[in-house]
Image (cartoon, grey):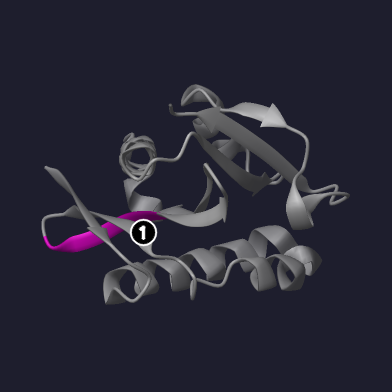
Amino acid sequence: MIQMKRTDAKDPDFLSLVQELDADLALKDGDDHVFYAKLNVVDDIRQAIVAYDGNQPIACGALRDYEKGVVEVKRMYTVPEQRGKGIAFKVLEELESWAHELGYDRLILETGKRQPAAIALYLKAGYVITANYGKYVGIDNSVCFSKNVS
């Protein structure tokens, strides 16, 4: 049975999964990885989710304040051997619930065009493609999404 833990960016299991995510993204993003890595630091993340199968951390996601009423979904990752089981969807649902509890009205996120599984996940979860925001404006590889949770 999959268990969800609410934590923060200092959690060692969260940090371990983020290291795996960064290694995976370095392969997928190629030359763009240096740009994206600067946007993916976890220092200012106060809400993180780690999913466990027993004692094994298998997936994560996080929230980062963006602006009043809006929070950004960051650092979504599922270990390869657990993909295709709906775990990322559950992590995303937990993040949405937490964001709503914290008083946010809308979630936003960015993913890369080279990540079709992530794009499919967000569309399935009811996110809509929006104009690129913030530091992603003008970045061809970026696909941005939003979802209202109020």
Left or right: where 148 falls relative to 39: left
Q: Would you place residue 134 above or below residue 57 in this image? A: above
Residue under the point 64% across and 68% down: 26
Q: Is residue 125 above or below residue 6?
A: above
Residue 90 image point, x, y percent: 31, 37
Q: Nearer the viewer, residue 43 or 116?
A: 43
Residue 131: image quadrant is top right
Q: Is residue 90 left or right of residue 19?
A: left
Q: Is residue 2 magenta?
A: no
Q: Quadrant of the C terminus?
A: top left
Residue drawn where x is 72% and y is 40% of the image: 143
Task: Work out whether 47 lies above or below 11.
Answer: above
Q: Which residues are magenta?
A: 55-61
Residue 109, x across and y down, in percent: 59, 44
Task: Give the residue type at disc 1.
Answer: Gln
Say what secondary structure mark 1 lies in. Answer: strand
For the point 64% across and 47% down, the residue is 111
Tally of numbered tags: 1
Q: Residue furthest front?
A: 68
Magenta part, dominant SS: strand
Q: Is residue 118 left or right of residue 29?
A: left
Q: Position of residue 1 (x, y in %)?
A: 11, 42
Q: Which residue is mark 1?
A: 47
Q: Tell me which corner region of the image, top left, top right, bottom left or bottom right, holds residue 28.
A: bottom right
